[in-house]
Amino acid sequence: MLPLSPAYFAFAAAAILLYWICCRWTSARLGVLLVANFFFLARFAWFYPALLLAAASIDFRIGIELQELPRRPEFARRRKQFVALSLLVNLGLLIATKLLPLGYDQLYHWVLPLSLSFYCFQSLTYTIDLYRGTNPGTRSYLEHLTAATLFSVIVAGPINRVADLIKQLRQPFSLTKTEGGRAFLLIASGLLKKLLVADFLSENVVNRVFDTPTLYSGVEVLFGVYCYALQIYFDFSGYTDIAMGVSQLLGLQIPDNFNRPYWASSIQDFWKRWHITFSTWLTTYLYFSLPSARKWKGWNYINPLIVMLLGGLWHGIGWPFLVWGALHGAGLSAERAFSVWRGKSKSTPLTRAISIFCTFQFVCLAWVFFRSPDIATAWAVLTRIVSGTFGVTNISLLMVAWVVLAIALQFIPTDWFPRAVERFGRTPFAVQGATLAVVILLIEFIAGKGSTSFVYSNF
C-alpha cells in the first residue's frame, strides 16, 4: 500500500478522521495513530509491526537508560555502550535490507517489500541526540512508538528527529483552516508532480533511453538524461509534498526536502537544496563524528568523500551508486580546495549563471550512474552522448512541451505557495476537499494508465 494508491488515500482518510475524533484525549489520539502505523506496516508484510515494535522498544529502553545516566566522565563508557547497541540494531536492519537483494532479489521483494532505511535513520536520531544531550527524551512508551513508526514518512521520509515528532505529539491537536488548506494544496501538488510530470517523462523518454541507449542519437540520449534529472526531482518532491500534506492533517509539521535544487551554484549548495533532511542527517550524525581538521587538515577533503561514498551505498549496494557517491564526494572536496586556494570573491550575475549551469551539468553526469542498472549501461549512455550524432527523430513536440513545463515550474516565485495557501485557507473546508477531489479526477483522466512507484520508496 504505497502512497499514491487509492487504498493509501482511503486508509489515510480513515486514520485522520479517527485521529480528529479522538483529538481531545492525548492517549486515545496517539493510540489511534499507533494502530494506523502498525496497520500500514502490516499491509506490506505481516511481520513488519512485530519487527519494528521490537526495534523501537529497544531504542526506547536505551533512551530511558541514557536519560538516567548522568553525562559525567565516570558514566561515559556505559553511555557509549547503550548508543552502540542502538547503532547495532538499526544499522543491522539497514544493512540487512541492502544486502539481501544481492543474492535473493526475487525472494527479497516478496518477503521484504518495504525498505527500512528511513526508519533506521530516523530512529537513530533519538538515541544519538540523547547521547549527545542535544534533545530531550520521553518516558512515554506510547509517544516513542507512535513517533518512531509514523506511517506518513516511514516509506521515503522526510527524515525527522524523533524528539521533534514527540514534542509535537504531546501538544494539543489543532488544525486551522490555513493549515488544512496548506495540507490539501501539498497533496494536490504532489499528485500533479508525480502523475503529470515525473511519470510522463519516465514512461515516454527516460526508461526508453536508459534501456537501449545505443538506439538513440547523442542529442536524444542527452535529452533523456536531462529528463531524468527532472523526473527524479518531481517524483521525489511529489512524494515529499504528499507526506507533508498527510502529516499536516495530523497536526504535524515535518521539514521540506527541497529548495529549488537545480538553482544551486555549487555542489555544496546543491546538497543544501536536495534531499535536505538526508544531507542534514549525514552532516549532523556522520560528518561531525569523523576525525576533525584539528588533528589533520587533510580530513577537510577526505571526510566529504567518506560521507558521500556511504551515502551512495545507502541507496544501494552496487558500483553505480558507489560511483555516484564518489563523484559527489570528490566534487565537494575539490570545491573546498578551490575555495581555500581562491579565497573570498564577489559573485556577479554572470558568474552565478555560469556556476548554476556547470553545477547542473555535473549533477546530471552523476545522475547517469544513479539511474543506470550497471556501469556498462552508464558508460554506454555517456559514450552515446559524445558520439557526435544529432538526430532528434525520437523527440516529439509533446515531450519538449512537457520538459518546458517542468523547467518553467522551477521558476515559480518562492512566495507563491504561501500566498496561495493563505487564500485557499479562507475557503470552506468542503470546498478544499472538493477541489482536491477534482484535481485527482483530472489527473486520472489525463494520466490515464495509473502510476509507477516512487523512486525513493525503493531505498
Image: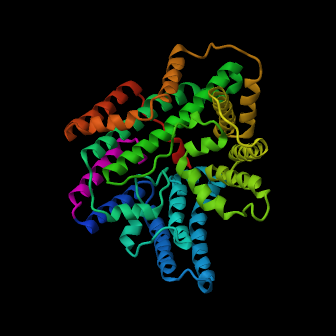
In the image, residue 282 sits, relative to residue 431, either above or below, namely below
15 within the magenta span: yes
Residue 284 is at least partly visible in this image: yes
- Horizontal side of 48 relative to 11 (left or right) equals right
- Horizontal side of 4 relative to 267 (left or right) equals left
- Horizontal side of 200 relative to 206 (left or right) equals left
Q: Nearer the viewer, residue 418 or 239?
A: 418
Q: What residue span does the magenta drawing correspond to?
A: 1-24
Extreme bottom residue here?
74
125 within the magenta span: no
The colour scheme is rainbow
Residue 453 is at least partly visible in this image: no
Number of labelled discs?
A: 0
In the image, residue 60 sits, relative to residue 72, either above or below, namely above
Task: Say which residue appears at 40% left-offset and 41% top-offset.
Answer: 4
In the image, residue 61 sits, relative to residue 321, either above or below, namely below
Q: Position of residue 192 (x, y in %)?
A: 41, 32
Magenta-colored segment: predominant secondary structure:
helix
Q: Position of residue 6 (x, y in %)?
A: 35, 41
Q: Position of residue 399 (x, y in %)?
A: 53, 19
Q: Position of residue 409 (x, y in %)?
A: 47, 28
* Quadrant housing residue 351: top right
Task: Say which residue appears at 53% left-offset and 57% top-offset.
Answer: 116
Task: Say which residue appears at 65% left-offset and 29% top-offset.
Answer: 357
* Quadrant housing residue 331: top right
